[in-house]
Amino acid sequence: MTAITLEQAAQILREHDNYLVLMHKSPDGDAVGSAYALCRALRSIGKKANPLCGDEIPESYFFITDGFEIQDFAPEYIISVDLATADLLSGTAKDYADRIDLCIDHHGSNTGYAKLSAVDGKSPSCAEIIKKLIDVMGIKADREIADAIFTGVCTDTGCFKYSSVRPETHRIAADLMDCGARSAMICRLMFDSKSPAKLDMERRVLDTLEYAAGGKIAFICISREIMERSGATQGDTEGVASIPRQIEGVRVGITMKEKENGEYRFSVRADDDTDASEICRKFGGGGHRAAAGCSIYADSPEKAKDLMIAVCIEAIGEDS
């Protein structure tokens, strides 16, 4: 891996064309917002650019994806955004795992999988880096770009309430609003709007709540059965991972999503004294100190759960 500045990244993006921008599996607001904002920005200067995610983009991001048509070209330059490790690619995106030319990311746990990397581990969101990058390129954000970036910033900061938020973050958000970002609508959709199916799914998930380490670890499971019975979509699971960590006395919150073929995806949320990214790195994942993710392949959900809880117990220094 070779680390580069945003100025160097901007020059590279001016020189190349036919871009493919990769997102991680189970894409969140930061991944979707960063990818679509970068593609729109590149298209605005005459480049060809398409986003790609191996998983379906949740419907909740319709205001970012609507009207965005996929262009017909053979990818020549591969970019990843908000991707700590190539192991977090899925589906057709995995085909490009060893071909990534440029990584733009904000995870301190980034594994250096790309040929070139513009990584700022202190940035609260990848979208914030994308905004700085297009500013360096001299691209003025229109409403579509501003909406996408604002979505990434607000979702990865918990609507600006996480400790990672800096004064600069608010200044960037204000600039995006000046560019037309529909901040009120976006925050309402991301944080204050739930479908009946999502509420039913959350109710069922709460029934799976378990504790370990004397209540310092909380675990919930989003099983395939729960998804089917509630009628919820993958997009409806957004934000559920914060629930176990919200419980008083809990130091590590674990959310397990049951996927196909023995895959169980974990979202880990930790307190200030515990490193969630270190926990997930043991299973090939990564992320931030406070929030990280990974996948475990196991014969049963119980085995996957036990493996994760054992590592979490070790991380907080408890017996069980």
Image (cartoon, rainbow, N blue to C red):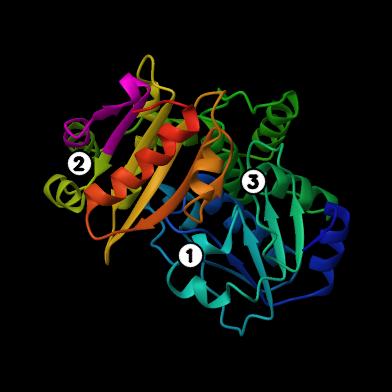
Q: Residues within 10 Å of mark 3 (few under 14, many from 20)?
A: many
Of marks 1 and 3, the one in the foreground: 3
The answer to whether residue 185 is visible is: no
Q: Which residue is mark 1?
A: 53
Give me the C-alpha separation between circle 1 and circle 2.
24 Å
Quarter of the image that includes the C terminus:
top left
Element marked by disc 1: loop
Q: Residue furthest bottom?
A: 74
Task: Write down the residue under mark 2.
Answer: 197
Identify the disc placed on residue 107: 3
> Is residue 144 in view from this perspective?
yes
Residue range in magenta is: 204-220
Is 303 magenta? The answer is: no
Answer with the quarter of the image where residue 163 lies: top right
Q: Quadrant of residue 195?
A: top left
SS at badge 3:
loop
Q: What is the crowding at mark 2: few (fewer than 14 residues within 10 Å), some, or many (at least 20)?
A: some
Of residues 202 and 267, which is closer to you in this image? 267
**Which amino acid type corresponds to the residue marked 1 in the rendered image?**
Cys
Spatial CA distance of label 3 from label 2 is 32 Å
Looking at the picture, which amino acid does disc 3 mark?
His
Which corner quadrant of the image does residue 192 belong to?
A: top left
Who comes first in sequence, dot 1 or dot 2? 1
* Amino acid at pointer 2: Ala
> Above or below — where is 147 with respect to 300?
above
Q: Secondary structure at mark 2?
A: helix
Q: Which mark is residue 135?
A: none
Q: Examine the rendered structure and indicate whether residue 159 appears above or below residue 117.
A: above
What's the CA distance linking mark 1 and mark 3? 19 Å
Give the camera-side residue of 33 and 241.
Answer: 241
